[in-house]
Amino acid sequence: MKKIILSALLATFMVGSTYAETVRMGTEGAYPPYNFINDNGEVDGFERDVGDLLCARANLDCVWVVNDWDSIIPNLLSGNYDTIIAGMSITDERDEVIDFTQEYYPPSPSVFMALSGADVDLDGGVIAAQASTIQAGYVAGTSATLVEFATAEETVAAVQNGEVDAVLADGDYLIPMISESNGEFVAVGEVSLGGGVGMGIRESDGELKAKMNAAIDSMKADGSLNTLIKKWFGQDANTF
């Protein structure tokens, strides 16, 4: 047993020592305003700004890695990157598989979006959600028919082409879309799900978690995190 514990501690130390060089930040790149790919082909959005500032305050050199949402946790566990910073809500189910930093974005409601004028039965209709999200889990637990898609963009397209009655996703993703749709889309309900958004980290990487938590603390203390929240989500967004 002592040998096992010693080996685990040594492995943790060796992993932690690499963080002085490079930390790979895994994101989806397809969920604005949290994260997206800009016209220059670079990761952009709220989490790019937050992540870069966190790395600077933690004295870490960070690079960005784009990964599809449906495999974003498995590829963290397999070592393809060192963090998940991708609009991921903290839930008990996810926390059984990976660890999380404290919240860098407060809890916000999920919204049902449909075509304007549609008669939507949220309890018994056909509802789209992105696969492996808290929204998909919620719909699956209701009497509605869940249709899952690999990307958030596909869920919206399914509403547009009449394949589903509505989509359930983060309000921060759908509300700007509704506002800019010239009346095409409308919010038809909302529900509170999960906790705030945190950075996913392997359970063995406690040193990295501690560094990121300290950096988040500093951003909360000096107001810079709230400034970025308002920049990307508007002046009326929930802040710390």
Image (spheres, helix red, strand yellow):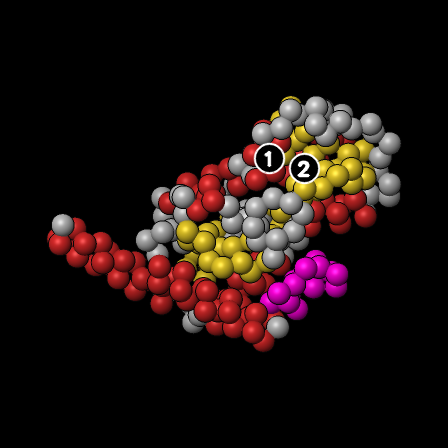
Asked if residue 71 is among those painted magenta in the image, a careful observer would answer no
Q: Amino acid at mark 1?
A: Tyr
- Give the percent coordinates (x, y) of residue 183: 87, 41
**Residue 212 visible in image:** yes
- Name which residue lies at 27% across and 58% down: 12
The disc placed on residue 72 is none
Q: Secondary structure at mark 1?
A: helix
- Name which residue lies at 48% across and 72% down: 57
- Name which residue lies at 70% across and 27% down: 123
In terms of image quadrants, where is residue 138? top right
Q: Amino acid at mark 2?
A: Leu
Residue stretch rendered in magenta on the structure? 225-240
> Would you say the residues marked 1 and 2 are in contact, meaning their CB atoms lie under 8 Å apart?
yes
Asked if residue 230 is among those painted magenta in the image, a careful observer would answer yes
Nearest to the observer: residue 111 or residue 232: 111
Q: Quadrant of the C terminus?
A: bottom right
Dot 1 or dot 2, earlier in sequence: 1
